[in-house]
Amino acid sequence: MGMRVAEVGVGELVKAGLSMEEAQEFERILKAAVGGARGSDPSEVWREVVARRVLSPSHPHGLHQLVFNSVYAEWDESTRGPPLYWFPSLYESQHTNLGRLMETYGPRLLGLSYKDPITSHSLFQKFSVQNLEVYWSMVLKELSVLFHRAPRCILDTTDKSKHGGTWLPGAVLNIAECCLLPVSYPRKHDNSLAVVWRDEGNDDSPVNQMTLKELREQVMLVANALDATFTKGDAIAIDMPMTVYAVIIYLAIVLAGFVVVSIADSFAAKEIATRLRVSKAKGIFTQDFIVRRGRKFPLYSRVVEAAPHKVILLPAIGKDVNVQLREQDLSWKDFLSRADHLPRPNYYSPVYQPIDAVTNILFSSGTTGDPKAIPWTQVSPIRSAADAWAQSNIQVGDVLCWPTNLGWVMGPSILYASFLTGAALALYHGSPLDRGFGKFVQDAGVSILGTVPSLVKTWKNTGCMEGLDWTKIKSFASTGETSNVDDDLWLSSRAHYKPIIECCGGTELASSYIQGSMLQPQAFGAFSTTAMTTGFVILDENGVPYPDDQPCVGEVGLFPLIMGATDWLLNADHEEIYFKGMPMYKGMVC
């Protein structure tokens, strides 16, 4: 057991990095906060410390550690779980997306059981699992999903060969068009901010901005050039950093009725070749180089080694590519000129397709054999955006930044999470490991920052973000690796202890199945809820489910009715990989 908060004195505060004068003043403020807490429970004391902003982002990390650890010195994790660092207020909860939905529909759907978004969160989550159609009919109205032909229903379970059911049957739309058109709700107009970005090395220049109208016109220009270059339905790969140009290309491929093949820009030629072969890609967009920390790393040469049919090559810097092209390849400038002959090159009539049309082929990591080729339909982006809307509370006017790549599931996920909710997408063209990225977060007014834990560890250990103002951030998100409690303490403290929403899911799900929530208290490095509409059991070594309320260690078995989850694979037997040998639970295969 460590030092209790009442025992923290000037000596300990000086050891934590304060001057004698600062330590004396801090001791007075800390004692006042402890005395002002509602009772002596550590969670109430910490809540008061945060509410009074006793600690600031400019304080040394050692001081944050000292105060947090001393407040929770007598906390018993074995009976109470991990210590809590963030608590939703009733007012805040009522103004979240999910809280607003619960306040509007909760009394009618849950009757007298409904109290408020915090108290009734778990009840509403269970309701969403048992009433999928009710929940999704409400949430679809909250996103900018525009049907060319409306679905017959939300969910059809008559085809028993489909464990996951058939979602939004009969619907026809173009999900990229949904990202690009102005709508009255959620409020998106032509002058709304859609993308903000900055190139590495231009840290003192204003951030670049693109409105919804500008984005739409750029996407439509590329769509016209695609029609002049490829045949409808072709699979077209993207292997480049997640720049504003990559986002435009992604949306254009989908708008024009082609299929995106997602390839991470870190892959070697052999891995690129495998993904081109499995997807039968007819072309690939890439860059001449990747520029990181002022150094140029060849990318085009790596892509060419994978022997693609056709490469469309963008310059990493400037307007002209700096390499010799193969005969069949096109520079970005020459590719775009293929739309020059049109009377309106910046206008394109979207290709409307059934809801289950494939828009994107993503891949599992492929650590053993060929990677699984996972097709995303037009339902997958809806699911992805709906999860971000509900769990990360992405709203109109937010600025979402999450350093990733279109080759991984988070790339398409954040693209749709921004454009289907009316938020802006923030992209840094460079390494996220350095201060330049942190300054971009500050200057772009990022309000939701996504991370992976190893990135946070680098930021904390190198001290590269010291002195930057991240206080516009209202929440963080984290996925991909196990979080470290001390690293998360550092991250949250950068924005006056805003919550870090932990997410765990999969490419096949187009979403998370377990995560944190803005309607529940949060602990560092921990999940607090199953995702909305998601049900699962935890199985013992014999495949027998544990009771719901029993603490246990085991394997997760998801209920199969998951909107947006894939129900086939391009190069493997979906049934054999995901369902064979799994136990039955309440009439469902887990």
Image: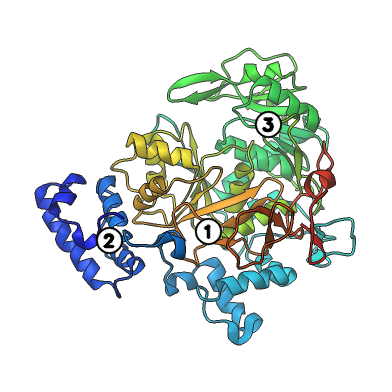
Task: Work out whether residue 131 or residue 147 is closer to the camera in this orientation and state it.
Answer: 131
Q: Is residue 516 left or right of residue 314?
A: left
Q: Name the amino acid, label 3.
A: Thr
Q: Is residue 341 visible?
A: no
Provide residue 34's location: percent of width, then percent of height: 24, 67
Query: What element does badge 1 sit on?
Result: loop
Kindly report which numbered mark, 3 or 1, lies closer to the viewer in this rendering: 3
C-alpha span from label 3 to label 1? 29 Å
Which of the 4 quarters of the picture holds residue 524? bottom left
Residue 79 percent coordinates (x, y): 45, 65
Residue 108 sits in quarter: bottom right
Residue 516, label in figure: 1
Q: Amino acid at mark 2?
A: Arg
Examine the rendered structure and indicate whether residue 303 appears above or below residue 350: above
Residue 536, how many percent across, how many down?
68, 60
Between the residue at mark 1 and the residue at mark 2, the CA separation in whole angstroms equals 23 Å
Q: Residue furthest front?
A: 542
Q: Give the secondary structure at mark 3.
A: loop
Q: Which of the 4 image quarters holds residue 185? A: bottom right
For the residues bearing labels 3 and 1, Cβ distance under 8 angstroms: no
Percent of width and height locating residue 240? 60, 30
Q: Judge from the rendering whether residue 493 lies leftward or rightward of residue 271; answer left or right.
A: left
Camera-nearest label, 2 or 3: 3
Dot 3 alpha-carbon crowd within 10 angstroms: few under 14, some 14 to 19, many 20 or more: few
* Residue 94 drawn above or below residue 331: below
Task: Give the vertical position of 88 relative to 411 (above or below).
Answer: below
- The residue that disc 2 covers is 53
* Residue pointed to by mark 3: 367
Q: Amino acid at mark 1?
A: Gly
Q: Residue at x 55, y 67 (%)?
A: 97
Q: Residues within 10 Å of mark 2 (few under 14, many from 20)?
A: some
Q: Quadrant of the N terminus?
A: bottom left
